[in-house]
Image (spheres, grey):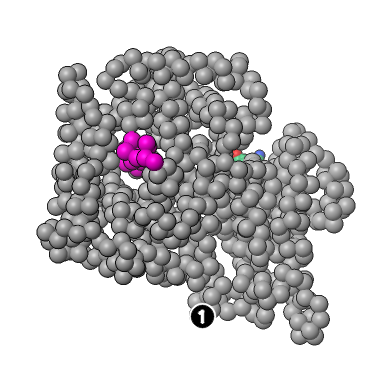
Amino acid sequence: MVYCTASGRPCRPLAGRGVYLAARCAAWVGTGPHKMRLPAIAVRGSADASKILKMRQMPSTPTSTRRGSSAGLPPTPAQSSNHSRVRTMFAAADTTQIELISLANCCWSGAPPEFRASSWRRLCGIESENPALLTTNRAAYRKLVDKLGPADGVASDQPTWHQIADLDLPRNAPDLPGMQTPPVRALVSRLLYIWAARHPACGYVQGIMDVVTPLVAVFAGHRGYDMTTGKDDGITEDQWLDVEADCFYTFQAILAAFQDAYTASQPGIHRMLRQLGSALSHVCPEVKQHMDEVGADLLHVCFRWMNCLLLRELPLALDIRLLDTYLSELAETGHSTLGTQAGLPLYHVFVCAALLAQFSAGILEADFQQTVHLLQHVRTLTDSWGDEELAEVLAQAHLWRNQYWSPGRLSD
Amino acid sequence: MAESEEYYDYLFKLVLIGDSGVGKSNLLSRFTRNEFLYESKSTIGVEFATRNLKMEGKTVKAQIWDTAGQERYRAITSAYYRGAVGALLVFDITKRATYDNVDRWLKELREHADPDIAIMLVGNKTDQPHLRGVSTAEAQQKAREAKLSYFETSALSGDNVEASFTELVKEIYSIASRAQIDVAGSSWVPTQFRPDHAESVPLGGPAKPASNGGCC
Ligand SMILES: Nc1nc2c(ncn2[C@@H]2O[C@H](COP(=O)(O)OP(=O)(O)O)[C@@H](O)[C@H]2O)c(=O)[nH]1
Ligand SMILES: [Mg+2]
């Protein structure tokens, strides 16, 4: 069940997590895998956390030696073994059902590009081995377009349409020409408008447009659309509607997990920020203390991290990679009775904590202004990241989540 | 980081407010970096930038916070007003609705900001005179009634951007330096310069730069 602990890749088993976790922790602290014991969750976190943090920074740990890789490098052995497992699943899909849980488990570490579109659809439940499911869903989306979409370009909710199409669309993803072509602009604005109409408690909230970009990149990309040039390889109008439907349902699935982040006064964001503060005081107490001392409020520096699910803080290739993991988390925990208490939002909080930890050296030297500046411009640093750096953050977050979260433990 | 920017005598926190799309972020980037981006991303949460100005031989660091204009964010943006000594309330001279909302922004300032905050009304996008929907006279009138100063700018051409920010800082500086004299004579001190606001406005004498062990 435990894959690739040797390489330190962020692969997780679904059963026996305690064992896996212990193995991973043991690997981190170098005591060998036979010490099958969960880190004592009841013990005050800071001692454990600082130990792990120190381990993280030790050059001998596997996770800290993989620096300077770039997105163009071939997948690591662990990743390619997961990729090949997914490929095998899809190759046999005619005769053997793809288990959602196995798919999620593999895609958590990154989906193979050629099966990403299909994997994502399966992870959000709009595609299965029965081809009728996807067809039905796409037809249902067309009905939504007829019912709720702007009729002949005229929207009934003008303020919302104005905010989406006139104010935000022109300044969406300015670095990606593929987001500004007529079919994509039409797709993005209509999708968001329909979503807002279907979710009146949220409505359109600035920042959710950022979530659409990686979805377009994957679903239109799968049809040969080139995000860097906007060349579309003869995609028909009907095919664009399929792309839009896939984007819409995936978008809906992701935002469903974060819904109270976008309702009036955004309680979900405030909860996640409180949880982040609490998580930090366990996993990086010195960073938390320093930020408190200089007065760098998480509300100031990490609001966007929550509101845009970190997607603005990473280059497109890593946004896509991040969503591999998030959609896998969703597929695994989507039906969890823990609801918003745990699940994807909580994991996201720990991803933010792990990202902050990456910059701990810089933060500890920074005053208030420098801290805010650093954390509001992490994109200038992550632009040079490859899969490896993000994988390290995701694995760290997974470890910390399992180690530090139990009901009521993080303040919320 | 930013060595030359480190020393300052005064630190003023200013906030940019106004409807979404009026050009707040571009005014900020024009003033602090002399940049205009045709397609800058929408602001989420709060961002800020600084620029040092000279006033009567003293260095004033203007720390300017940029906020999102969308209604949804107002609950959190109110937190950003804390400690602000100046506000630029921006509208788009080509979009009447953004001017009509000025009163709502003033109300929000009254509710959340310090009562003594210096406010400047700014009509942006003067590079589009053919699209003008709000006349200068009309805006001046509103400003006069609300006892605000009024400037018209273009973040695109850069017109008047420097002048408007500088004017606001000058206004605050003159209150602040007066306040300091008053502190010496222990008379009235505007609330935003009282010690409980000192974290963001260290005015009890020239502030030490952060690098000298001080902390803002
Ligand atoms: N013509 C013109 N356009 C401007 C000016 N300032 C901003 N814009 C444009 O207006 C849009 C919104 O600007 P932005 O600074 O993001 O507005 P904010 O939402 O208030 O921060 C962008 O497309 C800018 O290019 C200006 O002075 N003149
Ligand atoms: Mg802005």
Between A181 and A122, the residue placed more toward the observer is A122
Between B211 and A1, the residue placed more toward the observer is A1
Side (left or right) of A196 relative to A276: right
Q: Residue at x 51, y 64 (%)?
A: A296
Q: Main secondary structure of the magenta part?
A: helix
- The quadrant holding residue A137 is top left
Name the residue carrying label 1.
Answer: B212
Kind of residue sitting beneath label 1: Asn
Side (left or right) of A86 relative to B155: left
Ligand 1 quadrant assignment: top right
Q: Is residue A105 above or below residue B168?
A: above
Identify the image quadrant of the C terminus of chain B.
bottom right
Q: Residue at x 16, y 46 (%)?
A: A2
Q: Residue at x 21, y 23 (%)?
A: A97
Magenta stretch encompasses residue A264 = no
| Subunit ID for the residue under disc 1 | B
Q: Residue B206 in the image: x percent, y percent?
A: 64, 80
Magenta stretch encompasses residue A323 = yes
- The quadrant holding residue A214 is top left
Q: Is residue A41 above or below residue B37?
A: below
Q: Residue B142 in the image: x percent, y percent?
A: 85, 48
Side (left or right) of A269 relative to B53: left
Between B48 and B5, the residue placed more toward the observer is B48
Q: Residue at x 23, y 46 (%)?
A: A12
Magenta part of the protein: which range? A322-337
Q: Is residue A18 above or below residue A130?
A: below
- Estimate how packed mark 1 is, as few (under 14), some (14 to 19) or many (20 or more) residues with alpha carbons within 10 Å: few
Q: Residue A207 in the image: x percent, y percent?
A: 52, 41
